Amino acid sequence: MSEINEIIFSDKYTKDYDKTFIILYIVEGLFIILANLFLTIRLFTNRQLRAQKEFVVIGACLFFDVIFGITYFSAGVYRAILVFLYDRFPLVSMWDCFLTIHNQFFIIVTIMAGIILVFTAIDRFICVFFPFVYIKLHVEYAYMLMFLPYLIIIPLWIPGAIGAHDNPVVRNFTMNCLMNQALTVNFYVLYRTIRIVSSISCVFIYLPIFVKMCVRTQSIYNHTKIAPGSTKNGKRLLSMTKTVAMITGSTICLFTVPDLITYFSPFINSNAMYLMNLNKGLVNLIIFLTTQKCLRDLMFPRSARKTSAMLPSRTTRTNHTMIF
């Protein structure tokens, strides 16, 4: 925090702050952290799964949702402490808000949420439309693809920090420190624009995938060397179709819509919008568990033998493309 001689309080009382959002941030954020962390550890400690491109992509999405959950959990804990310690909200500077842990995470997930969706969509596009190319790619491709979004954050974070530091001692924001209080308007709008554009572009990438899966199912079978009469592989194909449709719909409803609202009204009370974004983490978990049997077995292990029997052999993994 900035060096100040005394605390200046605003005229807003902490008792009037809606505690519902604090509780939801802490409870739902903690659940998202624990559930996704458990699945991530289970997935990447499995030698067969972590050697397959498809599951590396899934694991990267699960790991991002761990960060996503930490973001909201830390915001809830921060504001719970604030409400407990003070009767009125102290006034702080933009730089003070920028330095809070939860806003650092909010900046990361705001930039990355759309970008990681685009990278995942590109992976699925290659898998569906260029299956022979996808089969030849090594697992390192998936690790590199999912690591790149983290590198993109750095050049975008630096100018935001510089902008927030321009007035480090002007205390004109309440200490609850929403993300729009931690950044200048220009960078707040920029970060939101990145997520809006990338999320919408992701939707357009998924649309032809969905059409191809629905209209040309037989062609997909032939291209991926899946037996046309196989009930098991037919269910796997249907599982991917459901996953794509549900992720696309949830992206529009829980990311793009609230982002557009906060984009056009940067200083709106955005707790409800953040809550919609938070629910995307929960919806993601539900989508993966309901459409991916392998993840259900990892989350709720029945027996080592059954899980082992479900997984493809490492020696034959290059001959099959598991689609999610």
Image: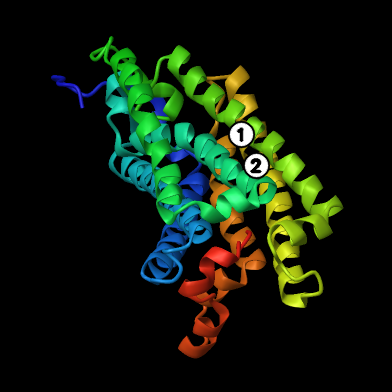
**For the view shown, which residue lies furthest in the right direction?**
215
Front residue of 45/32: it is 45
Residue 97 picture location, percent across and down? 32, 27
Q: Residue at x 40, y 61 (%)?
A: 37
Three-letter amino acid code at the position of disc 1: Ser
Color scheme of the displayed model: rainbow
Residue 209 visible, this angle = yes
Secondary element at tag 1: helix
Image position, residue 153 (x, y; %) = 38, 30
Q: Work out whether 275 lies above or below 243.
A: above
On the image, numbered disc 1 is attached to which residue? 199
Q: Quadrant of the C terminus?
A: bottom right
**Identity, as a three-letter code, of the amino acid under mark 2:** Thr
Quadrant in which the N terminus is drawn: top left
Which image quadrant for residue 227? bottom right
Tag 1 or tag 2, which sits nearer the N-term?
Answer: 1
Residue sitting at 53 percent across and 46 percent down? Answer: 278
Label 2: which residue?
A: 251
Is there CB contact under 8 Å for labels 2 and 1?
yes
Question: Looking at the picture, how far across and down is residue 89, in whole percent?
Answer: 35, 30
Percent from the top left, x then y, of residue 307? 52, 82
- Spatial CA distance of label 2 from label 1 is 7 Å
